[in-house]
Each structure stands twice: as structure tokens, then as C-alpha cells.
Amino acid sequence: QNPRGEMAPLLRAFGAGAAATAVSAVSLRFFSGSSASSSKGGADSSAPAKGFGGPHKLAGIKAPVPSDIAIAQAAKVLPISAVAEHAGILPHELVPHGADKAKVSLDVRERLADRPNGNYVVVTGINPTPLGEGKSTTTVGVSQALGAHLGARVFTCVRQPSMGPTFGIKGGAAGGGYAQVLPMEEFNLHLTGDIHAITIANNLLAAAIDTRMFHEATQKDKALYERLVPAGKDGKRRFAPVMLRRLEKLGIRPAERATGARPAAGAKLDPSRDYDPESLSPEERVAFARLDLDPATITWNRVVDVNDRFLRKIVVGLGAAEKGQTRETGYDISVASEIMAVLALATGMKDMRERLGKMVVGASRARKPVSADDLGIGGALTVLMRDALMPTLMQTLEGTPVLVHAGPFANIAHGNSSIIADQIALKLVGRDGFVVTEAGFGADIGMEKFFDIKCRYSGLRPNCVLLVATVRALKMHGNGPKVTAGKPIPREYTTENLGLVTAGVCNMQKHIENAGKFGVPVVVCINRFSTDTEAELEAVKRAALAAGAGAAGIGEHHANGG
């Protein structure tokens, strides 16, 4: 579709300076391809419920814009129970963590399974620079405009930030200015403990790896097997359920030997009868008990959610009790754990359990992959991650609901918030509502992984790509002077320079072209800074439309909210 003619009044609104509201007005028609008033009525109406706790327009906006934390701390934070009620979440589906944030049960998704999904919008950006493009700020600003100004049902879905960047030079990730997630401090710090759960689960697996190698190196075959399958109070040995996974992987099925036939597909095997530990041959016992991990192949590091460069390379096992079983390993940042990627891609408890168990931590000396389930720890990891499977409900400055869930990086994982959060939000907003989700890093990483990985697993298809660009970043892509974080910005970025802008717009245009190849319409939001000139902004708009964007507008949500 190419609705430029249909949207002419809205495009004129951009030129008139109606900033973020205009961006959202374009979104309202362009994302869905129809008017927002086309609701069939009933539970799917796009008009939010009336009453306390709903979206509200900001009052008392200041210029110049105060610091992010000053704005956040001066804001009125609504009770999360009121935000939930307005969003259509029932009391028993909410697990409060204090007065201003709560976990949301997956029961919501099941209750609304028959409700049509809302419109699905992915926010991405041009190639990142040290100057920042404002994807999170735009994600929040557009949501505020849709919910608080245009009266649509809307949810924002974003990742939980790591505390490493928060305490580093980058800072937090709650948006900025008058387009933020509240409470900003809690969003950027511990929140509801999901990253802590990932840290503990990750390190439990790391401990299991080293402990297993220690016991295999210090015990004979018989003792090792009997410690893995200890006798119960009745003197009988029994395999734990997770051990059956390893037996199946090894092709060890005592029941077949006893009956001469493979059990029927789907037959529920009795561990005490069909997998009697005493029935295994000596060779099978060795194969079961000895993973024979090659230390040189282990890819699983420990993690901590702060920047600590001196933990990048460490040596473990230096204690006398470890009997010389030392090896070199290291720490990663918590959100880089594969468990974070698993959380973001899981669609439910069972799916998460299977994914956790299949994680490969290294290879045996025979070059066979060794998984978490081979170590017998997949179930324990799932228990630790149980509550983390539920997204966290928060709110924007203008009272629109936000689901915060998962936080994988895009350079080492897929860089998107969770499938579960998007699924819940799409059901809650209904047919004519909007879910605005953000893909991390630039469009060449986060957006492409959103399509290639997240959408393939979820089965969801976005209605629109909202591409964020800034004049300053495009100047840098136009071969502007080098920018170093923490140092003064060269004057080329704070004064008009159309030459650098026109030289750099090719970066934005390529991302528009790439997004279009997925068959999804593209809207460009030019995130305005106070130093941008009208001529520079118009040059970017023209270049966006020439490259095939369905619409391009100037966003002033940082200064004006929705």
C-alpha cells in the first residue's frame, strides 16, 4: 500500500509542527491501513475505559527540558493496580511488586485467546552512533501520543536494561525527557528481579559444569554412577526424570531389551520399571555417568550484571579441596547469558523448559555436544526462572501501560523484548489497538533479527516499521568528525551543515529499502534535537520519502511528550 494521498492532511500536520502527535496520527492510520474508528465495538474497541488510572496528557511541561531524573521524580506515578485495571488486566492476573510495578500472569493470554490481535509496530533505528538516535524515547513518545492524545488502546513493550550500561557512560534506557517509563530508577535497576534470576540460573549451570568435571576426574566408574543414582530409603536406585533425557539421547532403553519391542510413540514409560538403573550394563553406566567434557570446548561463562573488566579472564579451582582441577574461564555480563535469549524467545513454561535443557555448554572429548540436560540441571534452571517468565507491568509519564520483559543484546543475541509480552499486549489492546515494541541497536541487527528470529518463533507479523533517525547521526554517517562519548561534540553537529546531512541520508535510505523487503510499510520519525535546523529536517524528510517511506515526520516527544 502507498497511502500518501490518503494521509495528505496528516503529512501537512508534520510540516505544521504537530510533532509526536502527528507521528502517532500517521501511525494510527498507516499501521492498520484504516481509520481507528472502525471498531466493531465490544471488548475490541480502541477507546480506553474511563476512570482513574488511565492515560492523561502532561501538564506543566518546562523549557528547556529538565534532566531525565528530575522529570521522572517530579511525575505522579499512578498505582499499578489502576494501570492494570484500565488495561483490562484482572486482579488475579496481577502479581504486585510494591505499589508501582507488578508481574502479569500468562493467564491473561489464555483468557483472551479468542480476541483478535491489535496492530503490531516495531521501532528501529539507523546505524547507531555515540550520539544516540532515541529509539526508546520514540517508542515511549509514540505510545503516549496514541494512548493519551488520540484515545487508542496502546501498550509499549520494551527490554529490561542491564545495570552494566546504567552504571557506565551510556546510562539508563527508560526513554528520556517527557517520554519515559516510570518509575525510572526502578526500571533501570533491580526491577522485579528477572536479571538476578538469570544470573543465579546461569551460575548454577556453571557450577554444575565444574563440579561434574571434578567428580569425573576424582572418582572411579562404579562410585560415580552410584553417586549420580543413589539408593533410596528402600535400598532401590531410581533415575530422576531428567536423567531419562540423557538415556534417550544415548539410545539406552532397557524396556526394549525386556520386551523386544520399542515402546509405542507417546507411551508413558515408568522410570522404576522401564529404566531400572540396575539393568544397565557396565558400558552403559560409564556412557551415562561420564560426560567427559573437554575443558577447551566449554563456552559457558559465569555472569554478573555490572561492568567488571578484571573478571573477563579468571582461573577457577585454586582451592586445596579442588585437588588441582583448575581451568581458565571468565565472566560475561548477565544479559549476555543464553538464558536471557531463551527467556525472550520462550512462549510458555514448557517451551522454556525445553530450551533451557537443550542449551549446549561444551563438547566431550569425542566431540559430542553436552547440554544442560546432560548435566541433569534443566529442571532446576526452569524453577529458578519460573517467575521471570511473567512480564513486568509499568507505565509511561502519560499513564499508558508498559510491559518490560527480557533484555538480550542485539550484537550477541537477537536484541528484542519477549514474545510473551508482545502476545499478551496484542490481546489486551484488541483489534484496533496498538502494540509498540522496540528492536535493539540498528535496523541491520535488531530489526532484521526481529523479523528473522522473533517473528518466526512467535508467528506474529508487524503492521509497520517505525524507523528513527536524527540529523546529528546522519551527519556522522556523512563523514562528519569523530565523536567520543564523554567529550564535547564537534560544532558540525550543533550548527547547520546540509552537506553532511545529504551525504549521510544514504544510511537511512538503505534501512528503508531493507525494511521494505520484508513487505512491511515504513514510517520515518526524525527525532528532533534543539540544534537541528528546519532546512536539515526537511532534507531528511525528502530523502526518506524518496527512498520509499510511506510517511516521514518530525518527533518532538523528548520536549513535549505525546
Image: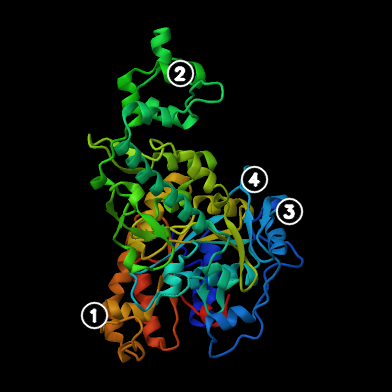
In what element is the residue under mark 1? loop
Q: Please tell me whether mark 3 sits on a helix, a strand or a loop.
A: helix
Determine which residue is flagged by label 1.
479
Question: At 56% across and 25% down in the image, what residue appears?
Answer: 233
Q: Mark 2 vs mark 4: give the one in front.
A: 2
Reading the image, the residue beneath label 3 is 91
Cα–Cα gap, marks 1 and 4: 51 Å
Mark count: 4
Q: Give me the residue at 31% from left, 62% from top.
A: 312
Q: Residue at x 53, y 68 (%)?
A: 189
Q: Are marks 4 and 3 in contact (CB under 8 Å)?
A: no
Viewer-nearest of labels 3 and 1?
A: 3
State the SS at label 4: helix
Badge 4: residue crowd in 10 Å (few <14, some 14–19, many ≥20):
some
Q: Nearer the viewer, mark 2 or mark 3?
A: 2
Residue to which mark 4 is pinned: 107
C-alpha span from label 2 to label 4: 39 Å
Residue type at the position of mark 1:
Asn
Mark 2 or mark 4, which has the lower sequence index? 4
Give the alpha-carbon distance from disc 4 to disc 3, as whole Å: 11 Å
Report the amino acid beneath label 4.
Asp
Q: Earlier in the sequence, mark 2 or mark 3?
A: 3
